[in-house]
Amino acid sequence: MSLIYSGTLRSPINREKKFTSMTNANWHYPTKIIVGAGRIAELPVLCNDLGISNPLLVTDPGIANLPMMQSIKNICAQSNLPIVVFSQIKPNPTGQNIEDGVTTYLAGDHDGIVALGGGSALDAGKAIGLIARQKCRLWALEDAGDNDKNADPDLIAPILAIPTTAGTGSEVGRAGLIVNEAEQRKVIIFHPKMLPSSVILDPELTVGLPPHITAATGMDALSHCLEAWCAPNFHPMAEGIALEGIRLVRHNIETAVEDGSDIEARLNMLVASMMGATAFQRGLGAMHALAHPLGAVYDAHHGLLNAILMPYVLKANQSAIDEKIARLAGYIGIESSFSGFLDWVLTLRGRIGIPHALSSVIEQDEVFSQIGEMAIVDPSAGGNPIAFSAGEYQAILDDAYHGRL
């Protein structure tokens, strides 16, 4: 039996209600989502529903050699669905990775994408499906102005997404982060039809995820919800989704890290990840504005960067978010104050093995001093509660590097 949703919610009179769990569920927000343990078995049916008879399965090199891949191939073989695997992608996928994927897609005359994996695989799969048959170049679809009109929507391949990590929520996103190697920056590629047509949310596929990856990706989900909650833009629906996503992380991330076989915690983290990606259309902020250039330049894990940067960015934004963070803290059941929430973040990071300082994962070089300038032009900077200057971004970065909070 798979538990879809459980936990406690504090009511205004401080009573607790237990949520009812279900075996399986089918959701249609913001896309078609098939939820439950073992539902990867429905992959051939979903491909058929989308008119996909010859899919290219895009994943990362690590997953390509796991037993789950053979299981998926067996499921497809039983339904006479051919599967070709493309896995030549980096943890921060590059333009060259996408070009190579397009070459494979066209050579095999594929008619759809199955994107399987963490954020890198999902972003790469969506980008390949978007650009494979277009006349424009990938970079012409950067998320700016009306660039999405450069693509012919009728030529975008149908995309089915299957997350194996609970972090980016890319399975419910209309964009993908791809590194432009020539410019050493992460570019947000966007088109409304990049949103996968169907998603399989199967917690059994995340059971083998190592604790340190579970921790880093889970903190990425928290960063999405948290920055969406703090963003100043008017979007009450996204605000509500972010709030509940943070509560789910609070009650499930430690269990998922400590006991990877806990299906309930795994599924609740997958849900929190999707909620973060749905909510951050309200905006992101300085965590991501710094993590994007750091990831592009140093090829460091995106979720881990956000996890390390989190308390430093919170502290820098305190004057603008003090009351909002206090409300958030009360909702998730901790001391209703900014300091109470910050203490929870710091304690959580320590318990799940997140380093306190950036110096644990990157080394300064001549580019490090330019990250602040790169952050102010990152699209995520526009959602930060305070419009930091390049110098202020650099100061946050320096504090995070040396562990000064």
Image (cartoon, helix red, strand yellow):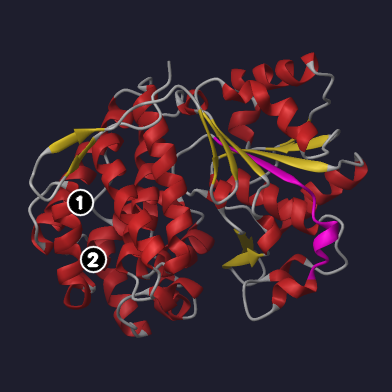
Who comes first in sequence, dot 2 or dot 1? 2
| Residue furthest front as drawn | 13
In the rendered structure, the answer to whether residue 105 lies left or right of residue 27 reads right
Between 298 and 277, which is closer to the camera in this rendering? 277
Asked if the residue at tag 1 contacts the one at tag 2, i.e. Cβ–Cβ closer than 8 Å, the answer is yes
Mark 1 burial class by Cα count in 10 Å: few <14, some 14-19, many 20+: some
Between 148 and 215, which is closer to the camera in this rendering? 148
The boundaries of the magenta stretch are 151-163
Indicate yes or no whether the magenta region holds residue 106: no
Residue 147, above or below 262 = below
Q: Name the spot of residue 359 as percent of width and height, x first.
A: 31, 56
| Residue that numbered label 2 is attached to | 314
Q: Give the CA separation, mark 2 to mark 1.
A: 10 Å
Secondary structure beneath label 2 = helix
Q: Name the spot of residue 394 as percent of width and height, x first.
A: 33, 76
Quadrant of the image containing the N terminus: top left
Q: Residue at x 27, y 29 (%)?
A: 255
Q: Name the spot of residue 174 as percent of width and height, x first.
A: 61, 59
Q: Name the spot of residue 271 as percent of width and height, x first.
A: 43, 40
Residue 14, above or below 378 = above
Residue 69 in view: no
Q: Residue at x 66, y 50 (%)?
A: 124
Quadrant of the image containing the C terminus: bottom left
Between 42 and 14, which is closer to the camera in this rendering? 14
Q: Residue at x 74, y 27 (%)?
A: 45
Indicate yes or no whether the magenta region holds residue 162: yes
| Residue that numbered label 1 is attached to | 345
The quadrant in which residue 237 appears is bottom left
